[in-house]
Amino acid sequence: TFRRRKVGDGMDNDLMLLESIGQGCTESYCELYQRYKDRIHRFAHSRIRDCDVASDILQETFLTVWKTARNFAGGSAVSTWLFGIAVNKVREERRRRGPDALPLTAASTILIAPDFTTSSDMRLTVLGAVQSLPEEQQEVVLLAYYARLPYLDIAAIQNVPVGTVKSRMSLAKKTMLSTLQRGM
Protein backbone atom coordinates (compact mmCIF):
# COMPACT_ATOMS: atom_id res chain seq x y z
CA THR A 1 0.00 0.00 0.00
CA PHE A 2 1.00 3.60 -0.57
CA ARG A 3 1.84 5.68 2.48
CA ARG A 4 1.94 9.41 2.23
CA ARG A 5 5.01 11.01 3.70
CA LYS A 6 5.16 14.67 4.50
CA VAL A 7 7.84 16.31 2.47
CA GLY A 8 8.72 19.97 2.71
CA ASP A 9 9.28 20.56 -0.98
CA GLY A 10 6.62 20.04 -3.66
CA MET A 11 9.28 18.82 -6.09
CA ASP A 12 10.27 16.10 -3.62
CA ASN A 13 6.61 15.20 -3.34
CA ASP A 14 6.30 15.01 -7.14
CA LEU A 15 9.33 12.74 -7.25
CA MET A 16 7.87 10.55 -4.54
CA LEU A 17 4.62 10.32 -6.50
CA LEU A 18 6.47 9.45 -9.69
CA GLU A 19 8.46 6.72 -7.96
CA SER A 20 5.22 5.29 -6.63
CA ILE A 21 3.64 5.47 -10.10
CA GLY A 22 6.63 3.55 -11.41
CA GLN A 23 5.65 0.80 -8.99
CA GLY A 24 2.08 0.79 -10.32
CA CYS A 25 0.31 2.96 -7.72
CA THR A 26 -2.83 4.37 -9.32
CA GLU A 27 -3.53 6.61 -6.32
CA SER A 28 -0.24 8.44 -6.87
CA TYR A 29 -0.99 8.63 -10.59
CA CYS A 30 -4.34 10.29 -9.88
CA GLU A 31 -2.72 12.74 -7.48
CA LEU A 32 -0.03 13.76 -9.97
CA TYR A 33 -2.69 14.05 -12.68
CA GLN A 34 -4.83 16.33 -10.49
CA ARG A 35 -1.81 18.45 -9.67
CA TYR A 36 -0.85 19.14 -13.31
CA LYS A 37 -3.90 18.55 -15.51
CA ASP A 38 -5.11 22.15 -15.70
CA ARG A 39 -1.71 23.65 -16.50
CA ILE A 40 -0.90 21.04 -19.14
CA HIS A 41 -4.36 21.29 -20.70
CA ARG A 42 -4.18 25.09 -20.80
CA PHE A 43 -0.74 24.92 -22.42
CA ALA A 44 -1.87 22.35 -25.02
CA HIS A 45 -5.07 24.28 -25.70
CA SER A 46 -3.18 27.53 -26.22
CA ARG A 47 -0.93 25.84 -28.79
CA ILE A 48 -3.51 23.69 -30.59
CA ARG A 49 -6.64 25.84 -30.12
CA ASP A 50 -8.93 22.84 -30.02
CA CYS A 51 -10.28 21.76 -26.65
CA ASP A 52 -10.84 18.14 -27.65
CA VAL A 53 -7.37 17.77 -29.11
CA ALA A 54 -5.87 19.47 -26.04
CA SER A 55 -7.71 16.92 -23.88
CA ASP A 56 -6.28 14.13 -26.04
CA ILE A 57 -2.78 15.56 -25.60
CA LEU A 58 -3.31 15.71 -21.85
CA GLN A 59 -4.37 12.05 -21.83
CA GLU A 60 -1.48 11.01 -24.08
CA THR A 61 0.94 12.89 -21.83
CA PHE A 62 -0.26 11.05 -18.74
CA LEU A 63 -0.39 7.72 -20.56
CA THR A 64 3.28 8.26 -21.32
CA VAL A 65 3.87 9.11 -17.66
CA TRP A 66 2.19 5.86 -16.61
CA LYS A 67 4.23 3.81 -19.07
CA THR A 68 7.60 5.45 -18.43
CA ALA A 69 7.55 6.63 -14.80
CA ARG A 70 10.06 4.02 -13.73
CA ASN A 71 12.46 5.23 -16.43
CA PHE A 72 12.58 8.80 -15.05
CA ALA A 73 16.29 9.52 -14.57
CA GLY A 74 15.84 12.47 -12.23
CA GLY A 75 17.92 14.84 -14.35
CA SER A 76 15.22 17.50 -14.04
CA ALA A 77 12.20 18.35 -11.93
CA VAL A 78 9.17 16.14 -12.47
CA SER A 79 7.23 19.19 -13.71
CA THR A 80 9.90 19.80 -16.35
CA TRP A 81 9.69 16.18 -17.44
CA LEU A 82 5.87 16.34 -17.63
CA PHE A 83 5.86 19.54 -19.68
CA GLY A 84 8.62 18.15 -21.88
CA ILE A 85 6.32 15.24 -22.72
CA ALA A 86 3.40 17.62 -23.32
CA VAL A 87 5.50 19.92 -25.53
CA ASN A 88 6.57 16.95 -27.65
CA LYS A 89 2.94 15.78 -27.98
CA VAL A 90 1.90 19.29 -29.03
CA ARG A 91 4.72 19.49 -31.58
CA GLU A 92 3.70 16.10 -33.03
CA GLU A 93 0.09 17.27 -33.32
CA ARG A 94 1.05 20.58 -34.92
CA ARG A 95 3.19 18.75 -37.50
CA ARG A 96 0.36 16.33 -38.17
CA ARG A 97 -2.25 19.09 -38.55
CA GLY A 98 -0.22 21.50 -40.61
CA PRO A 99 -1.26 25.15 -40.51
CA ASP A 100 -3.86 26.01 -37.89
CA ALA A 101 -7.35 25.87 -39.31
CA LEU A 102 -9.17 27.52 -36.41
CA PRO A 103 -9.82 31.26 -36.32
CA LEU A 104 -8.39 33.33 -33.47
CA THR A 105 -11.81 33.68 -31.87
CA ALA A 106 -11.84 29.94 -31.19
CA ALA A 107 -8.94 30.44 -28.83
CA SER A 108 -9.61 33.91 -27.45
CA THR A 109 -10.39 32.71 -23.93
CA ILE A 110 -7.56 30.19 -23.70
CA LEU A 111 -4.49 32.33 -23.53
CA ILE A 112 -5.50 34.61 -20.71
CA ALA A 113 -5.68 33.07 -17.25
CA PRO A 114 -9.25 32.46 -16.01
CA ASP A 115 -9.10 35.25 -13.42
CA PHE A 116 -7.98 37.87 -15.97
CA THR A 117 -10.63 40.59 -16.15
CA THR A 118 -9.78 42.21 -19.46
CA SER A 119 -12.35 42.46 -22.24
CA SER A 120 -12.59 39.72 -24.84
CA ASP A 121 -11.37 42.22 -27.49
CA MET A 122 -8.17 42.73 -25.51
CA ARG A 123 -7.80 38.97 -25.04
CA LEU A 124 -8.08 38.51 -28.79
CA THR A 125 -5.50 41.25 -29.37
CA VAL A 126 -3.04 39.67 -26.92
CA LEU A 127 -3.61 36.24 -28.44
CA GLY A 128 -2.93 37.63 -31.89
CA ALA A 129 0.30 39.20 -30.63
CA VAL A 130 1.47 35.89 -29.15
CA GLN A 131 0.50 33.97 -32.27
CA SER A 132 2.46 36.38 -34.44
CA LEU A 133 5.67 35.31 -32.68
CA PRO A 134 8.02 32.67 -34.06
CA GLU A 135 7.31 29.16 -32.74
CA GLU A 136 10.14 29.08 -30.17
CA GLN A 137 9.12 32.44 -28.71
CA GLN A 138 5.45 31.43 -28.50
CA GLU A 139 6.47 28.32 -26.61
CA VAL A 140 8.62 30.33 -24.15
CA VAL A 141 5.81 32.81 -23.46
CA LEU A 142 3.23 30.08 -22.94
CA LEU A 143 5.47 27.92 -20.76
CA ALA A 144 6.55 30.89 -18.64
CA TYR A 145 3.23 32.67 -18.17
CA TYR A 146 0.58 30.01 -18.53
CA ALA A 147 2.35 26.85 -17.41
CA ARG A 148 4.24 28.94 -14.81
CA LEU A 149 7.56 27.23 -15.42
CA PRO A 150 10.88 28.88 -14.54
CA TYR A 151 13.38 29.65 -17.30
CA LEU A 152 15.65 26.80 -16.18
CA ASP A 153 12.83 24.29 -16.79
CA ILE A 154 11.90 25.88 -20.11
CA ALA A 155 15.55 25.64 -21.17
CA ALA A 156 15.51 21.91 -20.36
CA ILE A 157 12.27 21.39 -22.30
CA GLN A 158 13.53 23.29 -25.34
CA ASN A 159 16.99 21.77 -25.01
CA VAL A 160 18.69 25.17 -25.13
CA PRO A 161 20.76 27.21 -22.64
CA VAL A 162 18.90 29.43 -20.15
CA GLY A 163 20.37 32.46 -21.90
CA THR A 164 18.57 31.45 -25.08
CA VAL A 165 15.27 31.26 -23.19
CA LYS A 166 15.89 34.73 -21.74
CA SER A 167 16.74 36.06 -25.19
CA ARG A 168 13.62 34.52 -26.72
CA MET A 169 11.47 36.00 -23.95
CA SER A 170 13.05 39.42 -24.36
CA LEU A 171 12.49 39.35 -28.12
CA ALA A 172 8.93 38.08 -27.62
CA LYS A 173 8.12 40.91 -25.20
CA LYS A 174 9.53 43.55 -27.57
CA THR A 175 7.67 42.10 -30.55
CA MET A 176 4.41 41.79 -28.63
CA LEU A 177 4.69 45.32 -27.27
CA SER A 178 5.24 46.65 -30.77
CA THR A 179 2.35 44.58 -32.13
CA LEU A 180 0.03 45.71 -29.35
CA GLN A 181 1.01 49.39 -29.73
CA ARG A 182 0.24 49.24 -33.46
CA GLY A 183 -3.13 47.67 -32.72
CA MET A 184 -4.22 50.33 -30.25
Image: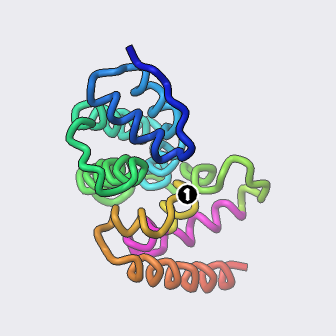
Residue 60 position (above or below residue 166): above
Residue drawn 65% across the image and 78% down it: 180
Residue drawn 35% across the image and 36% down it: 18
Residue drawn 68% across the image and 47% down it: 114
Residue drawn 36% across the image and 40% down it: 57
Give the residue number, with chain letter if any, for mark 1: 148
Magenta segment range? 122-140
Q: Quadrant of residue 112?
A: bottom right
* x, y percent for residue 160: 31, 74
Q: Is residue 101 visible?
A: no
Q: Is residue 39 visible?
A: yes
Residue 70 position (above or below residue 107): above
Q: Callout 1 environment at 10 Å: few (<14), some (14 to 19), or many (20+)?
A: some
Main SS, magenta residues: helix
Type of residue at label 1?
Answer: Arg
For the residue labelled by badge 1, is the local secondary structure a helix, a strand or a loop? loop
* x, y percent for residue 184: 73, 79
Q: Closest to the observer: 139 or 51?
A: 139
Q: Quadrant of the N terminus?
A: top left
* x, y percent for residue 133: 46, 75
Q: Is residue 92 part of the magenta span, yes or no? A: no
* x, y percent for residue 166: 47, 80
